[in-house]
Image (cartoon, rainbow, N blue to C red):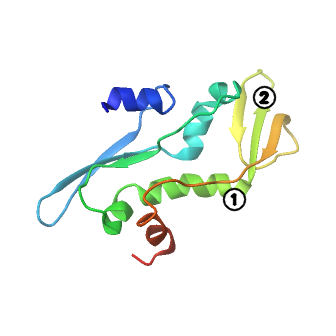
Amino acid sequence: MSKKKRRAYFGGNNFPPSVDKIVLADKTIIPFWWKRPDELLQHLINFIFKLEERLLEIANVEHLKDDTTILKDTVLKKVVEGLRVIQNGSRFIVRSDENGSVSLVFTRDDNEEVIHDVPISLYMNGDMNILPRCLDGRA
């Protein structure tokens, strides 16, 4: 599947990823990209209101081997940082300001007008062999 088709499948909205690369000791170049989940959701707030199910791809590492060190050195910390913002708040709150602009936050502030406030849970999907080892530090 081409990158253009894959991006259309995963949301179809232009939210460019952060792109980087690492060079291993053997000179192998590993390109990778990521999107902070909390920032992606903020960007997609207008689409979320349509109540359609969306698949969101938030990271990609182009490397042939399943190597937890590569994940940790590339996308893992960046993605987990955004997931922690979402998890720690445990709420999906859409609020509006005095100008009528809407924004997405994950913790409640009683001084702002809330449009929607619902509890959230995080579920992860990926390579089930490597993902748990990355998240619990056994890699």
Farthest residue, direction bottom: 138
Q: Is residue 97 above or below residue 92?
A: above
In the picture, the disc for residue 18 is none
Image mark count: 2
Residue appearing at x 78%, y 28% in the figure: 97
Residue 52 position, x and y percent, is: 66, 28
Q: Are marks 2 and 1 in contact (CB under 8 Å)?
A: no
Q: Give the mark nearest the N terminus, 2 or 1.
A: 1
Element on which disc 2 rests: loop
Q: Residue at x 81, y 24 (%)?
A: 98
- Specify the quadrant of the image occupied by residue 22: bottom left
Q: Residues within 10 Å of mark 1 (few under 14, many from 20)?
A: few
Q: Nearer the viewer, residue 5 or 104?
A: 5
Q: Which residue is mark 1?
A: 88
* Amino acid on which disc 1 is placed: Asn
Quarter containing the N terminus: top left
* 30 or 100: nearer the viewer: 30
Around disc 2, counting alpha carbons within 10 Å, would you say few (fewer than 14), some (14 to 19), or many (20 or more)? few
Quadrant in which residue 104 is drawn: top right
Residue at screen point 55% across, 45% down: 37
| Residue wearing tag 2 | 97
On the picture, is 9 further left or further right than 42?
Answer: left
Name the residue nearer the viewer: 33 or 102.
33
Identify whether 87 is placed above or below 68: above
Please state the horizontal and vertical placement of residue 81, each as a whole percent of the image: 54, 57
| Labels 2, 1: front one | 1
Name the residue furthest left.
26
